[in-house]
Image (spheres, grey):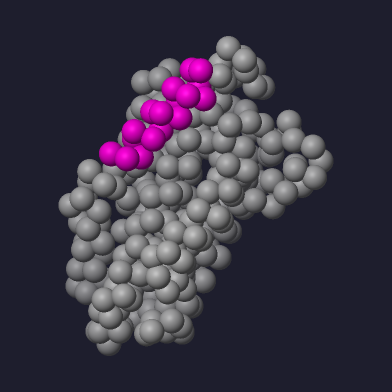
């Protein structure tokens, strides 16, 4: 439960303003990258892959590109903020303030969630301008929010467990990126062989993309309700993990 609302608001505001201040680095790159993906995969390859599940290929990949952008930004915000404070040795000082582990964790998570959500909404607008119709706007907004929260929590955990920028980049490049590409961004997982399909079904990114693809386009590779239940439980689990890790103080000092 939040008790120190002044401290909680101050830290949350700082985390939100931190990425808005450098919006050219935190917002513009995601937009440019998404536009490049749309052109390279959606336009250049559409002649070879006309449609999947009755949806044009360009439209089919848009929800996946949106979700990849949300995940990348949400993780990056909390992970970089946490690691920077560790390297500067300012995190131990923050821990002695009258803020509980829950208040500290949620403040950081809110910053990452806002960054992921803002980037997600901007990419959603690009998708709409590209011709994508939103089947269920409320579910779409909720999914963008809950996934932003989930991976912001994961980023907080990764940042606390990392000892250097190289280690942080290693986790992002060799864990998050493969999970994103194996989650069905550019294809239906039903096109994979049985072993590939089995791997995808235990990939949390698959359920985030699957739920958003159903909410926007009305097609999915797994039941929508199952995907929604999974991402809500996944979000709860990662939030608890982030709070408990902060509470333990593990790797706070070098």
**Would residue 191 appear left or right of 154 to someone viewing this image?**
right
In the image, residue 9 lies at what x, y percent?
22, 67
Q: Residue furthest bottom?
A: 96
Q: Is residue 59 visible?
A: no
Q: Residue furthest front?
A: 166
**Would residue 183 appear left or right of 65 to someone viewing this image?**
right
In the image, residue 70 lies at what x, y percent?
42, 45
- Quarter of the image containing the C terminus? bottom left
- Quarter of the image containing the N terminus? bottom left
Q: Residue at x 25, y 53 (%)?
A: 19
Residue 41, compared with residue 83, is above or below; it is above
Q: Residue at x 35, y 70 (%)?
A: 83
Q: Residue furthest right?
A: 194
Q: Is residue 202 visible?
A: yes
How many numbered discs sit on the rendered protein?
A: 0
Q: Is residue 43 magenta?
A: yes
Residue 215, compared with residue 75, is above or below; it is above
**Would residue 175 appear left or right of 68 to someone viewing this image?**
right
Q: Residue at x 46, y 49 (%)?
A: 71
In the image, residue 226 lies at what x, y percent?
66, 46
Residue 233 sits in quarter? bottom right
Residue 170, compared with residue 240, is above or below; it is above
Region of the chain picked out in magenta, as a range: 28-44
- Residue placed most toward the observer, 98 or 30: 30
**Would residue 153 appear left or right of 91 to someone viewing this image?**
right
Q: Residue furthest top?
A: 47
Residue 214 sits in quarter? top right
């Amino acid at each position: 439960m939040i008790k120190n609302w002044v401290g909680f608001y101050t830290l949350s505001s700082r985390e939100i303003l931190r990425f808005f201040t450098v919006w050219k680095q935190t917002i513009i790159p995601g937009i440019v990258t998404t536009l490049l993906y749309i052109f390279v995969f959606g336009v250049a390859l559409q002649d070879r892959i006309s449609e999947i599940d009755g949806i044009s290929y360009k439209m089919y990949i848009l929800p996946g590109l949106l979700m990849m952008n949300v995940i990348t930004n949400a993780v990056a915000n909390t992970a970089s903020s946490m690691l920077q404070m560790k390297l500067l040795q300012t995190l131990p000082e923050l821990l002695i303030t009258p803020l509980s582990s829950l208040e500290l964790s949620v403040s950081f998570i809110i910053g990452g969630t806002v960054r992921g959500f803002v980037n997600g909404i901007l990419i959603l607008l690009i998708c709409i301008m590209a011709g994508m119709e939103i089947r269920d706007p409320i579910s779409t907004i909720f999914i963008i929010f809950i996934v932003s929260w989930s991976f912001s929590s994961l980023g907080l955990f990764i940042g606390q467990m990392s000892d250097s920028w190289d280690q942080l980049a290693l986790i992002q490049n060799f864990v998050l990126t493969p999970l994103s590409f194996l989650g069905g961004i550019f294809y239906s997982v039903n096109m994979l062989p049985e072993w590939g399909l089995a791997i995808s079904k235990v990939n949390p990114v698959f359920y985030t993309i699957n739920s958003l693809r159903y909410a926007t386009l009305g097609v999915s590779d797994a039941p929508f309700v199952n995907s929604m239940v999974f991402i809500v439980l996944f979000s709860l689990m990662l939030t608890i993990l982030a709070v408990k890790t902060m509470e333990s103080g593990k790797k706070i000092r070098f």
